[in-house]
């Protein structure tokens, strides 16, 4: 099974914050990088940086997963552009449960099974807590 690399691309520093939170819980992470698109940034420069990182990781014979925050946003559009030219997987809606699942089981499954598990973790991680259902 190939080693995997995760590239997180979000609006602002959201992805960097997620990665920082994950490292508080799970320790320093390898094979993961977070990039942010901030107000006033040149989207083409970020796209070029993403493309360069992806080329480098593919040359290292790694499978690349690009995780973005928002379906249809600029980070998503960058990921799709890269996906047209390179063999990468893209997943949207990155959140803490997804990232924990992804990074804790990154080398346990093939990439398709891993993405299915990540999707399930994201959905299962959403809960509505009603006060009436709590026992104090």
Image (cartoon, grey):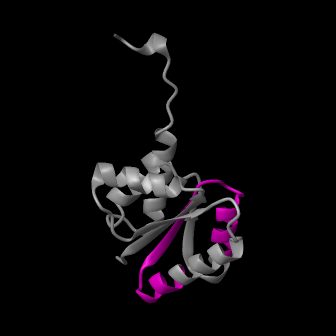
Asked if residue 3 lies in the magenta stretch, the reply is no
Residue 100 in view of the camera:
no
Dividing the picture into quadrants, the one containing residue 88 is: bottom right
Q: Position of residue 16 (x, y in %)?
A: 48, 58
Residue shown at 33% from the left, 69% from the top: 30
In this view of the protein, which residue sits in the foreground, 44 or 132? 44
In this view of the protein, which residue sits in the foreground, 3 or 36? 36
Residue shown at 41% from the left, 86% from the top: 60
Q: Position of residue 111 (x, y in %)?
A: 44, 68
Count of numbered circles in the view: 0
* Residue stretch in magenta: 54-81
Q: Position of residue 38 (x, y in %)?
A: 63, 60
Asked if residue 65 lies in the magenta stretch, the reply is yes
Residue shown at 55% from the left, 69% from the top: 89
Left or right position of 55 against 26? right
In this view of the protein, which residue sits in the foreground, 80 or 20? 20
Tell me if residue 102 comes above or below residue 88 in the rendering: above
The quadrant the N terminus occupies is bottom left
Tell me if residue 69 comes above or below residue 128 in the rendering: below
The quadrant the C terminus occupies is top left
């Amino acid at each position: 099974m190939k080693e995997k690399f995760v590239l997180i691309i979000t609006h602002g520093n959201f992805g960097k914050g997620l990665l920082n939170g994950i490292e508080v819980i799970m320790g320093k992470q390898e094979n993961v990088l977070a990039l942010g698109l901030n107000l006033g940034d040149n989207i083409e420069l970020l796209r070029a940086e993403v493309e360069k990182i992806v080329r480098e990781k593919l040359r290292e014979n790694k499978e690349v997963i690009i995780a973005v925050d928002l379906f249809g946003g600029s980070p998503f559009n960058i990921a799709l552009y890269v996906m047209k030219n390179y063999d990468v997987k893209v997943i949207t809606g990155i959140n803490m449960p997804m990232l924990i699942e992804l990074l804790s089981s990154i080398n346990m499954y093939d990439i398709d099974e891993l993405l299915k598990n990540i999707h399930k973790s994201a959905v299962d991680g959403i809960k509505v807590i009603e006060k009436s259902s709590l026992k104090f």
